[in-house]
Image (cartoon, helix red, strand yellow):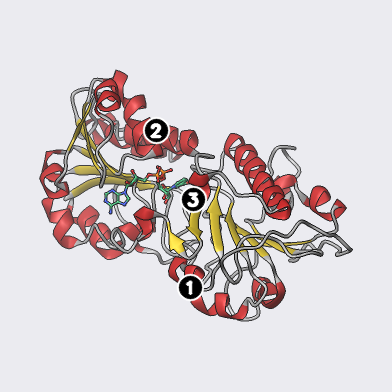
């Protein structure tokens, strides 16, 4: 399915740039391609449902009124997919982590006119960032747009796992009534040790949300927080991840997917975790070794695993996490609430507007700029 916009004339400001294909628009109409998940019958159910392919962030009229061409498609993978037809002549690609358009080095090489890769949401690991930097592209995301959405969702998943909620719900649907089957492994959250691996925007907000539950809060990050903030939040810094892991009843992953975090939770790391540990991962599926997680859930070393991120996405029908015991997985949904969609649609529009005018983006939005990756991706 392609939803095509019509190109006409447009002239935008041009500001010189140090790099070959860097940020500023050249005069004339731009070809902008958006890759979003398809909503079918749900598309018309809520006027604020902007994140789907049909509603295309709500920016079609605005773009077309300025003479730009706006193509939107959910068809992103496999030979002859719609996205690949537009790669050779697009100027801007808007993608989301929920239905990631994998922007490989090969695609970047073919994209002769490409200048800007915008992520509507947070997390641009579906893009080969090094190849983008080498090609002089700008990569930016709507930083902060779904921080609240993800932190709330993580808190919910922690409670779902700790209380052993899902088996009870499944009993209701299947006509059963077996209190013992739930109660033998249901706990209170109070008094448990919760550790977040990564305490940036989402990790910190999660810690703040957890404070009233009277847990023992720990965090590991490559950077220690400001001490005043750390004491307000009530979490202790653990410089050594391996020292933090065995202390935790619950681990939450909140780092980006980078070369350093890819496959970080392999058999060796998982062996360091407390037996029966609960894990929540809304960060990225590929931070975990897929099979190591499935095996540890089967053996009971991991007592419960919940998250909304997988690799690849959409998750294939035979993905091992669909079939492992004690999982509370969902499709990638936490950062795409209606509130989040409104924020990342507005943020994407703002960045496009700045791009047309040759203005810079807010500094925190850049993932690749002037051939440099943001520090945590290096
Ligand atoms: N599931 C969803 O819908 C969804 C939505 C938004 C974000 N996310 C994911 O969550 C991630 C975190 O988002 P955020 O807004 O909190 O990002 P952020 O940049 O504010 O925070 C990331 C934190 O991780 C730390 N970090 C990076 N590499 C590290 C390493 N190797 N070791 C230890 N700490 C490291 C950073 O120092 C930083 O504090 C995103 O990168 C994205 O992958 C998922």
Q: Nearer the viewer, residue 305 or 168?
A: 305
Q: Quadrant of residue 19?
A: bottom right
Q: Is 7 situated left or right of 216 in this image?
A: right
The disc placed on residue 360 is none
Observer-side mark, 2 or 1, equals 1
Mark 3 C-beta to ligand 1 under 8 Å: yes
Observer-side mark, 1 or 3, equals 1
Is tag 2's residue or tag 3's residue first in the polypeptide sequence? 2
Is tag 2's residue or tag 1's residue first in the polypeptide sequence? 1
The alpha-carbon separation of the residues under discs 2 and 1 comes to 40 Å
Coordinates of residue 277 in the picture (x, y in percent): 19, 43
The disc placed on residue 134 is 1
Mark 2 C-beta to ligand 1 under 8 Å: no
Q: In which quarter of the image is residue 12?
A: bottom right
For the residue labelled by badge 3, is the local secondary structure a helix, a strand or a loop?
Answer: loop
Q: Name above or below for residue 184 compared with residue 228.
A: below
Q: Mark 2 points at which residue?
A: 156
Coordinates of residue 212 in the picture (x, y in percent): 31, 18
The disc placed on residue 332 is 3
């Amino acid at each position: 399915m392609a939803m095509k916009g019509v190109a006409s004339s447009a002239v935008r400001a041009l500001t010189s740039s140090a790099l070959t294909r860097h940020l500023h628009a050249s005069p004339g109409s731009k070809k902008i391609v958006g890759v979003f998940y398809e909503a079918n019958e749900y598309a018309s159910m809520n006027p604020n449902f902007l994140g789907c392919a049909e509603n295309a962030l709500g920016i079609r009229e605005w773009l077309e009124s300025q003479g730009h061409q706006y193509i939107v498609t959910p068809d992103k993978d496999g030979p002859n997919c719609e996205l690949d037809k537009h790669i050779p002549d697009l100027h801007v690609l808007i993608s989301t982590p929920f239905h990631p358009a994998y922007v490989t080095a090969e695609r970047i090489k073919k994209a002769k006119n490409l200048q800007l890769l915008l992520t509507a949401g947070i997390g641009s690991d579906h893009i080969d960032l090094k190849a983008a930097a080498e090609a002089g592209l700008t990569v930016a995301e709507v930083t902060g747009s779904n921080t609240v959405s993800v932190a709330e969702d993580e808190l919910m998943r922690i409670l779902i796992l700790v209380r052993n909620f899902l088996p009870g719900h499944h009993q209701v649907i299947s006509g059963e009534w077996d209190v013992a089957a739930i109660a033998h492994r249901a706990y209170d959250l109070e008094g448990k040790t919760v550790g977040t691996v990564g305490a940036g925007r989402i990790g910190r907000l999660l810690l703040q949300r957890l404070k009233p539950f009277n847990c023992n809060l720990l965090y590991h990050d490559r950077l220690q927080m400001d001490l005043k903030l750390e004491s307000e939040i009530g979490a202790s810094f653990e410089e050594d991840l391996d020292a933090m892991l065995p202390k935790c009843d619950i681990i939450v992953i909140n780092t980006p997917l980078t070369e350093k975090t890819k496959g970080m939770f392999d058999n060796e790391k998982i062996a360091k975790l407390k037996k029966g540990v609960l894990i929540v991962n809304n960060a990225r599926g590929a931070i975990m070794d897929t099979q190591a997680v499935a095996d540890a859930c089967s053996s009971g070393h991991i007592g419960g695993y919940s998250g909304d991120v997988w690799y690849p996405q959409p998750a294939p029908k035979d993905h091992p996490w669909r079939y492992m015991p004690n999982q509370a997985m969902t499709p990638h949904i936490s950062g795409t609430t209606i509130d989040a969609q409104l924020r990342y649609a507005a943020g994407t529009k703002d960045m496009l507007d700045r791009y047309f005018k040759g203005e810079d983006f807010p500094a925190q939005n850049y993932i690749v700029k002037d051939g440099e990756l943001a520090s945590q991706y290096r």
